[in-house]
Structure formats: structure tokens, C-alpha cells
Amino acid sequence: MLKENEDLQLEVSARVRVLSEALPYMQQFAGRTVVVKYGGAAMKDSTLKDKVMRDIVFLSCVGVRPVLVHGGGPEINTWLGKLGIEPQFKNGLRVTDADTMEVVEMVLVGRVNKEIVSLINTAGGKAIGLCGKDGNLICARPQGDEGIGFVGEVSSVDTEILQSLVNSGYIPVVSSVAADETGQAYNINADTVAGELAAALGAEKLILLTDTAGILQDYKDPSTLIYKLDIQQARSLIEKGVVAGGMIPKVNCCVRSLAQGVRAAHIIDGRMPHALLLEIFTDSGIGSMIVASEFMS
């Protein structure tokens, strides 16, 4: 019995220490906007999914203004298979013909988005689902590569609807589907959408949940994680090939958002339970933070 009481006291003491360490960060970020791109294993593992939603609600409860952006590639592939449509990719981009675009919109806007909204609401938050079409939030344009169909990029952002929602205490959940000026729908990379929304909102942070520890000096060795770097260092790592493959567009997305005024961009491991809270509310963090040069000290 004595041992159980000692263990309980240690656990309670640990919780108090965590809260004490988190307090300055809660005070610093209260009222600030944080844009989170949700994807990877954190979307596929039900346990991780619940923890991410609880983290988002926690942020909202302590005064942070979270905006969640999501993709849904695996779910799209599943439904394409059910409909007898073979998924195709070109240079890492999903080839999106008219039939595929219908499935993308159905899955991202009608299924994945509403599931996330429901999970946040169940966790005690107040979420509202949107896509780029709602309130003319995002105007799209063709990405430009030949043979990829309706793959788009962000032409402009109108944050009025997002500002209205966050000012009213709601958590916007945004899927990466938008339309051009004619109403044609486009499939846009969710990292890109998150970065552009963060810039347009003047967000304090852009956080990308990924399936890697962050930016590694040696991609085979997680112990070589780079915890903090500036824009110039990030670009240099791309030029040297240290940042390669699928990490390049993520780092470029972070750099672009920082160049447009976002204070810090983070690439963190979404496979780690409560990754968001660990990155935002602890001294050490868990992933890679990219900042403008003047914030390196």
C-alpha cells in the first residue's frame, strides 16, 4: 500500500511539474493562431487520432486558436479502389481526372472532414468543417504540370470566414479542396494549404504532423534530429541533399510561410502521443523548428 501511495505521489508530482513548465507557454500563446496540418500515421491509428483531437481541444481551452488542415490520401485510394478507379501518380502528385476529382471531393469534404469534426466535438471542442470553397476561403489555379488533371495550387486566400469562426470560439477544420473562379474544383496538397492559411492568418506557428522525427542530418539516424534552424540553413540542407524526397515540399512549405510572416514552423513526429503539446508547451520540444534568422537566438 505504501509503495502504491509513493507511486501515486510521484505521478502527481510529475503532472504538476509539466503544468508548471507549460504555464509560460500557455501565457505566451494565448490568443495566438496555430495552424496544424494533420496527416500520416496520426490519421490512421485510432489511438493516436483520439490523442490529436484531445490536444487540439486542449489548445482551444487554454486560449490558443487552432486551425486544423487535413488531407486524406489513403482514404481516397480506398474509395477509388471500391469504385474500380486505379490510383495514378506522376512526379509524386496524384493524377486527378474528372472522375478522380469527384472521389477526392467526396472523401475529403464529405467523409474525412466530418469525421474529424465529430471527433473534436466528442472530445469537448466546437469544430466546424470547411473546404476551400466555403466563403471563398481559397481560390485555386491549375498547378501547371501536364498530364495531372485537376491538381491545383493556392491562388489567393480570404480569411474572413476563419477569423469569424475562431473569434467565436470554434475550431475550423479545413480540407484541401478548393475551386477556381469558374467553380472548377481542384485537389491541392494539404501541406501547401496549411502554409498559405498560416501566412494569411498571421499565425504564430505552422505545425506539420509527419511520420518522421523531423529534419535529420542523417535520415537513417533519428539521433541526428536538427531541433532548430533558420530559413537559410533549411535552404542549404535542400541544396546539399540532406533534405530530400518527400521532405523537400514540407520544408519549402515552412520556408514560404515564414517568408510571409509566420513566426515559427515545426515539422514533428505525429506518431508520438501528444506530439502537439510536447512541441508547443515544453522547453525542449520534440521536432524541428524553422524560424527566420532574427529569431535564432
Image (cartoon, rainbow, N blue to C red):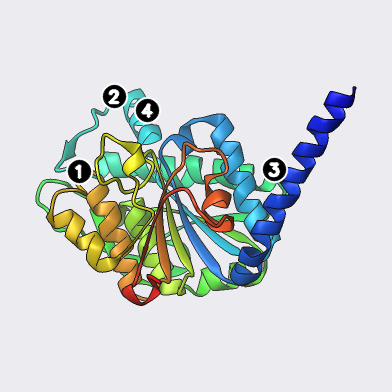
- Does dot 1 land on a helix, a strand or a loop? loop
Distance in Å between CA atoms under marks 3 and 1? 37 Å
| Pick the front one: 22 or 126 | 22
Residue 219 is left or right of residue 280, and the answer is left
Residue type beneath disc 3: Thr
- Does dot 4 land on a helix, a strand or a loop? helix
Residue to which mark 2 is pinned: 84
Residue type beneath disc 4: Thr
Is residue 181 shown to the viewer in this render? no
| Pick the front one: 87 or 244 | 244
Distance in Å between CA atoms under marks 4 and 1? 24 Å
Residue to which mark 4 is pinned: 78
Residue at the (47%, 36%) spot, across then down: 271
Residue 141 is left or right of residue 144, and the answer is right
Distance in Å between CA atoms under marks 1 and 2? 29 Å
Crowd class of label 1 (few under 14; some 14 to 19; many from 20; radius 10 Å): few
Residue type beneath disc 2: Gly
Is residue 200 shown to the viewer in this render? yes
The dot on residue 245 is 1
Give the mark nearest the N terminus, 4 or 1.
Answer: 4
Camera-nearest label, 3 or 1: 1
- Does dot 2 land on a helix, a strand or a loop? loop
Give the mark nearest the N terminus, 4 or 3.
Answer: 4
**Vertical comparison of 4 with 161: above or below:** above
